[in-house]
Image: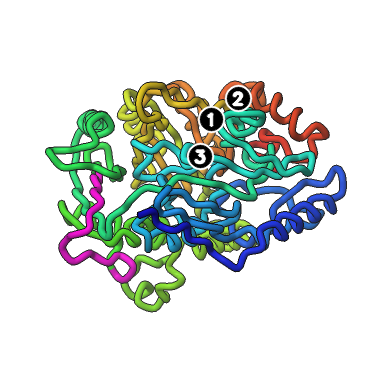
Amino acid sequence: MRAERVDHHPIDHDQAVDTLRRSYAAVPTGEPVRLAKRTSNLFRPRSAPRAPGLDVSGLNGVLSVDPAGRTADVQGMCTYEDLVDATLPHGLMPLVVPQLRTITLGGAVTGLGIESTTFRNGLPHESVREMDILTGSGEIVTVRPDGEHADLFTAFPNSLGSLGYATRLRIELQPIGRYVSLRNVRFTRLEALTDAIAEVTATRSWAGETVDAMDGVMFSPGEAYLVFARFTDTADPPSDYTGQAIYYRSLRQRTRDVLTAYDYLWRWDTDWFWCSAAFGAQHPVVRRLWPARYRRSDVYHRLVRLEHRHHVAARIDRLRGQPARERVVQDVEIPLGQAAEFLRWFAGAVGMTPVWLCPLRLREPAGAGSARAWPLYPLRPGQDYLNIGFWGTVPIAPGAADGDVNRTIERRVSELGGHKSLYSDAYYDRDAFDRLYGGDAWRAVKDRYDPDHRLTGLYEKAVARA
């Protein structure tokens, strides 16, 4: 018997969309258009807005979940935290759940996202069946993979709001068990690690066990781990990494582990991967005093924004005679065959550890056919990639300029045929940016749906920090 579609009320979606459109119409011509929202997972400093932001206050909910059809209709500002709360009671999850709780569905599609199911399910936008988008002309357009507006559907991922804002998305869901069984496998050679990724991507298994999700951590080129996860309804008592224990350290301590499905999806959020150490939150005494409800990524991000605004730590470093530091916060996609080379280069040239490893392959349709290409983030269909995430700061060497390390990383990524995400600092010149991020395709869609170019351009957002 077909399960009933579950509607989540009360949400007056039409009223919320009308409010958004009125707030858009109220932005003076020539002023930058921004979303008025409290949280952000961007690391790009931007110029201060002079006009009020777009009112998206009514667009943050789950509209409905269809357990039998395995789909959900969600509003554009709905966070994955809220969506997971709505789907897990049905034994379902989005095909990809980005690592941080307050990432929104609209943000993950227009700005990209990734997680441990990406090696088989692709990126979050590849599970979208249709979207309603507020375009630069002020109209709401429903877009699908084919039909009249397929060009906007295809160009929307990685457009960062330069082509419009999603107000509603229909996405696919997948089953997940009550628990996630983890197998932590250590590698002392990076080539062995990348060979293992290729094997699991091809077979969906490792040493006779099904692999439903896969990611890893490199502590050094001679010590790296892959975590092979299996969804299950029966398991030993689960571990808890929301208290004193810290998840990423467990990879060195355990070869087997179990988490509840909920805790697995948010395993990285409690300590912002490992970045909570910068705030003292991993010190045993501080951790006991720091309320658990405040050990989450959006709290840490607010602390970072305060530092960007007031530069307290930078002033203390100057008083201590320490060199200024450059922020190096990036996620890059490297073709799997070149990933070991990049990781060794990064360890020697930049030296930040740990780094996150997340295998990636564009989603391939069931049956015959190749994966769809996405012009604004042109990964190659059929190619295995490794996402490598590194987040921190490095001292600025004498005679060097702020940004030099990031520029060096950009060049190395391009030399190896990779790409980097645009949620943080970028330093490309316009010609290189257009070549790497589908400039011609972006302009064609921009001219059709935002003919007056009211929305800030992609280059201006990503590089010029407009």
Q: Secondary structure at mark 2?
A: loop
Q: Say the numbered circle drawn on residue 125.
A: 3
- Which of the 4 image quadrants contains residue 462? top right
Q: Report how far apart the C-alphas of labels 3 and 2 lie in the structure.
A: 17 Å
33, 150: nearer the viewer = 150
Callout 3: few (<14), some (14-19), or many (20+) C-alpha neighbours within 10 Å?
many
Quadrant including the C terminus: top right
Q: Position of residue 401 (x, y in %)?
A: 58, 38
Q: Position of residue 349 (x, y in %)?
A: 40, 34
Tally of numbered discs: 3
Q: Residue at x 49, y 52 (%)?
A: 72
Q: Secondary structure at mark 3?
A: helix
Q: Is residue 430 magenta?
A: no
Callout 2: few (<14), some (14-19), or many (20+) C-alpha neighbours within 10 Å?
some
Q: Are marks 1 and 2 in contact (CB under 8 Å)?
A: yes
Foreground tag (3 vs 2): 3
Query: In this figure, which residue is indicated by the disc labeled 1?
Result: 377
- Which of the 4 image quadrants contains residue 144? top right
Q: Is residue 187 left or right of residue 431?
A: left
Q: Is residue 271 left or right of residue 77?
A: left
Q: Amino acid at mark 3?
A: His
First in sequence: mark 3 vs mark 1 = 3
Q: Is residue 324 left or right of residue 218?
A: right
Query: In this figure, which residue is indicated by the disc labeled 2?
Result: 438
Q: Report how far apart the C-alphas of labels 1 and 2 lie in the structure.
A: 7 Å
- Characterize the magenta stretch by its predominant secondary structure: loop
Q: Amino acid at mark 1?
A: Tyr
Q: Which residues are magenta?
A: 226-244
